[in-house]
Structures are given as structure tokens and as C-alpha cells.
Amino acid sequence: MGPISYKAKIQTKLLRWFKKNGRDLPWRKTKDPYAIWVSEIMLQQTQVAAVIPYYQKFLRSFPTVHHLATATLSKVLKTWEGLGYYSRARNLHRASQIVTNHFGGRVPDNLRNLLSLPGIGRSTAGAILSFAYNREAPILDGNVKRVLSRLFAISGNPVRGKTEGLLWRISEFLIPKGHSNPFNQALMDLGSMLCTPADPQCSHCPLRSHCKGYLSGKPESYPPRTMR
């Protein structure tokens, strides 16, 4: 089986699974780059269930980039209160001012400008580009690293050097043209719902027949526990 055929099968099966099983999340009901940006920052270090009420509250208080940029930091921090990791709120506030002053109030639609904003790394930038603008940008959060490490039986440390670089290339290679948004969402959902760190639900996974980790009989060994 050639690499293109292999890629196409993964794309088709995962998108089909996502269409039936994808999570119903509030930030998936908008194409507003600002709202998607807010959700991605909140999700960086917090579980989905905990984020939802804070996301809704935050957008009620600051419905646009302009509202956030012109608010006082104390008000932003008060609205964020309870979500933790307050540097995220400070960076988001500062970044909103940069967007307002240097990008005409429009969230950038290219990787270079997104990465220039405080609090935005490559995976968050990829999520914004993919989900808001449907650009073919890869993502590589913890769930996606685990899924790809198992799918291709990659045993190196997923957060360092060559292995992380390889995972970025795989993530980008797998994106189906014109379907970056649902495909990247599907990768994240697969990791969250089935391809979990412990006791992965391989019997329900749409990719198990292509998964080298599953075929090895020890999917939990990817990525190595000592390296997570």
C-alpha cells in the first residue's frame, strides 16, 4: 500500500468517525477567530468541562477583541478568577491590545503574526488558523502527540528535538486539503475520547487497522510513560 493510499484511508475513516462522534462544544459553533482564540488559550492547561462556563462568561464580558483590549487588567483577571494559570489571562489581554493597535483589530490569519502574540505557540496558532480560517495548519497538542505516536509507533520523546519535529511533519502531512478544521478537531477528539493515556478504547477506534501501536499489542507503550 503506497503512502498516499494509506493517508487517504486515515483521512476518510477519521473524518467519518468525527462526523458521527465529535464532541458538541460551544467554540465549534462559531467561526469568530477571537472566540476560537479565547477557547484555545483556556484549553492550554485546563480540561474541556471546566473551560466551558468560563469561556461563556468571558465572552459575555468581552465579546470582541476591542472590548478585551480596552478593559482593565484587573477586570480581566477578575473574570478569569478560578480558572488558574493567570499568565494566560495577562498574555491574552496584552495580545488583544497588540491586535487592536497593530493588526487593525483583526486576529492575524498567518502563522508569523500569530506567533508574535504573547501566549500563542505553534499548536495554538495552528488551531486558530485551522478552526477559524480553515488553513491547512498542523496542530500538536498532548492528545495529538499521543495519537500520532501510537498510530506510527514512534517511541521517542514527543516533546523534544527530532521526535517532536517528526510529529509536526506527520501532523501536517495528514491534513486533507480543504478539510483542516474537521480533521484537526477529529484528531483531538480521538485522543480525548478513545486514544486515552491509559486503557485506550482500541476496539472502538476507526484507525485501529492502521495503527502500528495497536498492531504491536502494546499501544499504551507509545509514547513511553517516562517521557510524557
Image (cartoon, rainbow, N blue to C red):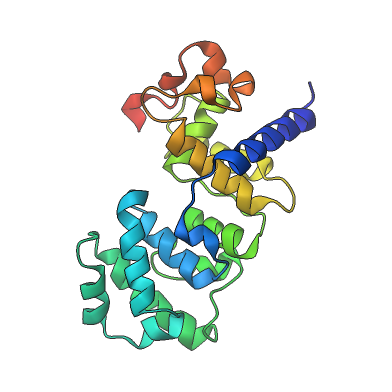
Q: Is residue 161 visible in the rendered structure shown here?
A: no
Relative image position of residue 20 (x, y in whole percent): 60, 40
Taking the image as shown, residue 97 lies to the left or right of residue 226, namely: right
Side of 187 where 6 appears, left or right: right
Q: Is residue 82 visible?
A: yes
Residue at 48%, 80% in the rendered image: 99
Where in the figure is residue 176, as x and y percent of width and height? 71, 45
Residue at (21, 74) in percent of width and height: 78
224 or 127, which lies in front? 127
Q: Position of residue 181 (x, y in %)?
A: 62, 53
Tell whether 174 sits left or right of 219. right
- Residue 182 to residue 101: above or below: above
Depth check: give the residue in front, 121 or 77.
Answer: 77
The residue shown at (61%, 36%) is 17
Q: Quadrant of residue 72?
A: bottom left
Q: Nearer the viewer, residue 161 or 18?
A: 18
Seen in the picture, residue 15 relative to 95 is either above or below; the reply is: above
Quadrant housing the C terminus: top left
Q: Compared to 98, does 26 lie above or below?
A: above
Q: Position of residue 7 (x, y in %)?
A: 72, 33
Q: Residue at x 65, y 60 (%)?
A: 134
